[in-house]
Image (tube, rainbow, N blue to C red):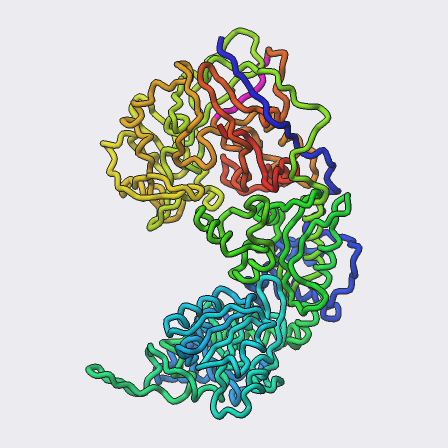
Amino acid sequence: MPTSNLKPRIPYLPSATPPPSPPTSLNGRATLAVDPLVDDYDGRLEAIRQTEYPQLFDPLTLACGEDPQLKTVYLDHGGSTLYAASYIRAHAEAMLQNIPANPHSRHVESMWTQAEIDHTRDRLLSFLGTSAEKYAAIFTANATASIRLAAELTPITADGKFCFTRASHTSVVGVRNLADERGASVCPIEFAEISNVIAPEVTHGSNLLAYPAQCNFSGERFPLNVAGRVADSYRDIEGHPPWWVLVDAAAYAASSPLNLDQLSTGPDFVALSMYKIFGAPTGLGVLLVRRSSVPYLRPKSYFGGGTVAGIAFDRQWQVHRSDVESRLEDGTLNFQGIISLQHALDAHSRIYHSMENVAQHAQSITSYAQTALRSLTHGNGRPVCEIYGHISNANYGPTIAFNILDNGGKFIGFVEVERLAVMAGISLRSGRFCNPGAAQGWLQLSTSELVRHSSMGFVCGDDHDLIDGKPIGALRVSFGAMTSKQDIDVLVRFLKWNFCNHSTAAGSVSDAISTAPINASKSIHERSTSSLQAEIEDVVIYPIKSCHGWVVPRNMAWEITRYGLRFDRLFVVMRENTTMPMQQKRYPNMALIRPRINASESMLILEASGHTSIEISLRPEQLHLEDIESHVCESRVKAMRVRSKNISAWLSSVLSVSCYLACDPRLLVSNSTEHAHSKLSADSVHFTRPEMSFANQAQILMVTCESAQQVEDWITEDFHSDGAASKAKIGPMQYRPNLIIKSHQTGTRKIRPFEELNWETVTIGNVTLSVTGLCRRCQMISIHQDSARRLKEPYSTLARKMRVDGKVVFGEPC
């Protein structure tokens, strides 16, 4: 009788270190050993939050008026701050009472709209600490568009330079291509080098210097008076100095007053984003242009509607409008968004009274947060957080970038931390935050490393966070005018509960795992009456990647090919006009697509509640296929689009997104004959050099019922578990395995939880499967496979109990 030979490797079990006390609800309070003094606008902050920012709270508890429960802890104000309820209501009411119209027309509504735009410019300039006498306010699509416009207007010459500092946003770095087109030199510099760079003795031609007022990675702030230093260096020169200064103030202006008129000489350009200050509207930026610099601006290459006073069709003749605002604002402005700024300014003034008050609050909350994060330590005294910046000899805004360390000093992947934070209702950000220079500097990433990572297929925003144990990004929390001490306390409790005293290393355990061989059933679903210690409970096929699984009937033998189980991950669903497979973690309704295979008819049947079923042939000659190239986990995969309007329409209807079906043609019926002999009950098939298709890590994923039950027991024991998860059974199928193994009911040797983590090979009959390592898990396993609901479990518990080298693991890929 065939047996299952299990070769051991280095033992691993979850750390035996007990976790700290569980966190309370989001609404709970915590006592931290840090300075409790946080500015709260003279005790008004909690009332402000409940009245002006109801989106933070559970609406049912907020309506009761007593101790409302937080729905989310929002700590991504650097990405976008929150809009005030009174601002939105006032704007909605104004929109219903007036008719904003295209200001290029001349009727009453149009002229009213133009007057409101002009009034908004004046009010905004006053809010920024200047006036129309000193600066022109040019409305743009966003801060990035403002930066690009400033670069186009700067008369950089071929013998000049474009210099930008390390902390510059990608939108500033991108100006180097425009400078290169004009033949100018491109010079990335440190901020401390500015005085040497702008010195007259090394300056030639006309140059542009760009820097941020606040780094959006670390929060470090830089002086606004650089233009004054330029002016001082070139007092004897008539006209504009050879250096133009662009300040990216998008991050800075969200929590601090600019007060431009207090500068001896203001920057030539200041780029701003409105939603970063007021929460809305998106799609509206501002470029401030110093009036004294306007006569020296480079003429725009392109001009749009509304920018000319006269134009001819059949010759190169046009006359630009005289006022700089009309000359530089191409096309119809976002006049509704611009008018809404008046209500935003009204609400901001009414709630906070001044930007100075916001700055004081932001400074105090940032100090409290960084002190609290630094106070987190493991039992051995090692820090939990590595914070980038916030050192005593520099000025920092309300942004903190950091990574998490285990008790051995090893990094825990920031993607894993962010996934847990999302489940805990905490909104933060991860990655490099579109700031290449600061990220490389703080994370000590060389350019050669970045090039190597790119050649490996890694891209910004994917799930890679550690390479060779080194972080390639970070976590970022950023605070706004309405951030409270309670928000910080919840964050700290979350980090303490999930990461304090945890180790990413495989440690020894008292009950060492036995390495004795374990028998398995003769073949898949083929039972034996002999006393066995293990057997296969179920074989599961996923004909469409990321959709629901199909359990092979117990009386049916199933083939293994060199690509894995036959028909497993044969198909993928892709968004229209893309070639990347859709994933259930982003489109949870994929779990509701139920496949069924009719092997005798070579047919795949798809079912979904509320939709008629649809049949898909598994024979290539019956499918209209078209070559495409896809990627799975950065690996190129041969794929073919299934050209069928009916199939595409069915999938699009179920998933509520335009999509289509694609397949790996090697796995279709006619292409399977060459390896159809590879049944588990036939001659040995050894997977030493497997071929991958649409599977992520390996062709087959194996889990044991015992390990799945242990996780469920952990969830039941922890009183902080998700209520929805506790009602829904979390069995082995939740982990989307191909093979579910369990102890045989009559066997004397039982499988212990996580014993499979030691197995090196598994032999079922004459088929040998090589265990390739630990299976890294993502939040997809917390999407309930029967309801498509997003749950906290089991991912949250696995993240605390089953982390190796900073990654959450469960199951064995073969």
Identify which residue, 725 or 706, lies in the foreground: 706
Res 694 quadrant in image: top left
Residue 663 placement (x, y as % from top left)? 33, 37
Q: Please indicate, yes or no, whether residue 642 appears anywhere in the rendered image.
A: yes
Q: Main secondary structure of the magenta part?
A: strand
Which residue is pictured at 25% across the width and 35% down the height?
623
Furthest residue in direction left, as rendered: 314
Q: Residue 398's spot in the image, x, y percent?
A: 65, 65
Q: State the residue in front, 498 or 508.
A: 508
Image position of 109 (left or right of 366): left
Residue 682 against residue 329 in the figure, above or below: above
At which x and y percent is residue 156? 42, 78
Q: In the image, is residue 277 part of the stretch drawn in magenta? A: no
Look at 67% across and 47% down and name the residue there.
Answer: 405
Q: Which residues are magenta?
A: 739-745
Up-down relation of residue 54 to residue 312 (above or below):
above
**Is residue 683 positioned above or below 424 on the image?**
above
Count of numbered circles on the image: 0
Residue ID at (72%, 51%): 28
> Residue 646 vs residue 566: left or right?
left
Does residue 773 lie above or below 673 as drawn?
below
Q: Looking at the image, can residue 153 be seen? A: no
Residue 70 location, x and y as percent?
65, 54
- Residue 579 in the figure: left or right of residue 97: left
Most foreground residue, 130 or 562: 562
Residue located 46% across and 41% down the image: 584
Name the residue at the front extreme. 201
